[in-house]
Image (spheres, rainbow, N blue to C red):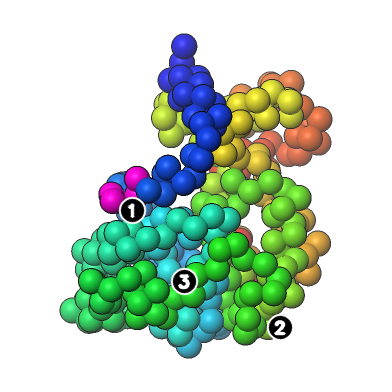
Amino acid sequence: MLKWQTRIACNTVKSFVPFQNRIRSIKHSFKPPALTGHHEALVRGILEQIEFIGTTGTSVSGARVLEIGSGWLPVAPLIYRLAGAREVVLTDQYRLLNRPSVLSAVDFVISKADAIAPALGIDPASIAGRLAIPREGDLPEMLAALDFTYLVPMDEGNIGEKLDIAYSHTVLEHIPPQILGSIFKMLRNNMRNGAIFCNGIDNSDHRKNYDSALSIVDFLKYSEASWKLLCIHPQDYTNRLRHSDYLALLAEAGFEVLDARTYVAEGRKAEVAGWSLPPRFASKTTEDLCTTWSLILARA
């Protein structure tokens, strides 16, 4: 059995364990998820987002900002706060944040002061003070100290004041297309005219993260039914949307796409051109199919 097959088989078994989210929450209340190379890349990705947003003439300073899919470790929201956001709204489908995870994220961001500060034009020595929290306090006290609002789940009625900026980083690819379209429309309704929406999207086959033998776009070969069977566990699910699909969903929700930065796996074009692809991919260009990273900037 290949590495990715073993991983998916184990996760599929786990998916049938009752109260799995609750069990995981209790576990992480004692020990937060480990900070990994993913979080190192996240710092670079969020700094690029903030720079990209700046190309529109929009400043994060003083903005009300919302993050889609904040997860366990609020590293990205902390960087947006350091960039001057007056409030960051954190959202998720399930309640994941807890005291240890916030403390871990704060300490991690402080440890990256020398990389973060020059990009944001702030003094590295000021970062610890800017992220000071009541370390013995409860979660609401910590979030209040950071000017964070936590919405679980986010819906049309609880976002509150109109947003100036919304963003995501390596989250959208894990959301089913029909739900994604609804989220885009809901956000558009809750953003002021001219507000900015910035999304970093990993369009690659995530199984390659734990099985290097796979092609970075191997998942394009599977039928819808076959792919569904490989994604029984939510952590294995990716929607396989391509760059052009995100552009279409944004336009449908009423956003104007301003710019995009993409990475195309040029070395995979010939390989993909020789595959017999499922109907949903058959009409797409090899450029689109092999676009494995999208950073999309849109205006409400």
* Quadrant the C terminus occupies: bottom right
**What type of secondary structure mainly makes up the magenta span?**
helix
Q: Circle 3 sits on which residue? A: 50
Q: Nearer the viewer, mark 3 or mark 2?
A: 2
SS at circle 3: helix
N-terminal-most mark, 3 or 2: 3
N-terminal-most mark, 3 or 1: 1
Q: Residue at x 76, y 39 (%)?
A: 284
Task: Name the outermost residue toward the left.
Answer: 125
Q: Circle 2 sits on which residue? A: 193
SS at circle 1: helix
Is residue 115 visible in the rendered image? The answer is no
Q: Circle 1 sits on which residue? A: 29
236 is higher (above) or lower (below) than 253: above
Crowding near the residue tagged with mark 1, few <14, some 14–19, many ≥20 C-alpha atoms within 10 Å: some
Identify which residue, 256 or 107, lies in the foreground.
107
Q: Quadrant of residue 113?
A: bottom left
Q: Is residue 92 magenta?
A: no
Q: For the magenta stretch, what is the residue range?
A: 27-31
State how far apart marks 1 and 2 are (Cα): 40 Å
Q: Residue at x 54, y 26 (%)?
A: 12
The disc labelled 1 sits on which kind of residue? Ser
Q: Quadrant of residue 280?
A: top right
The disc labelled 2 sits on which kind of residue? Asn
N-terminal-most mark, 1 or 2: 1
Task: Name the outermost residue toward the front.
Answer: 18
Report whether 151 appears left or right of 42: right
> How far from the left and from the top, in percent, is residue 66?
55, 71
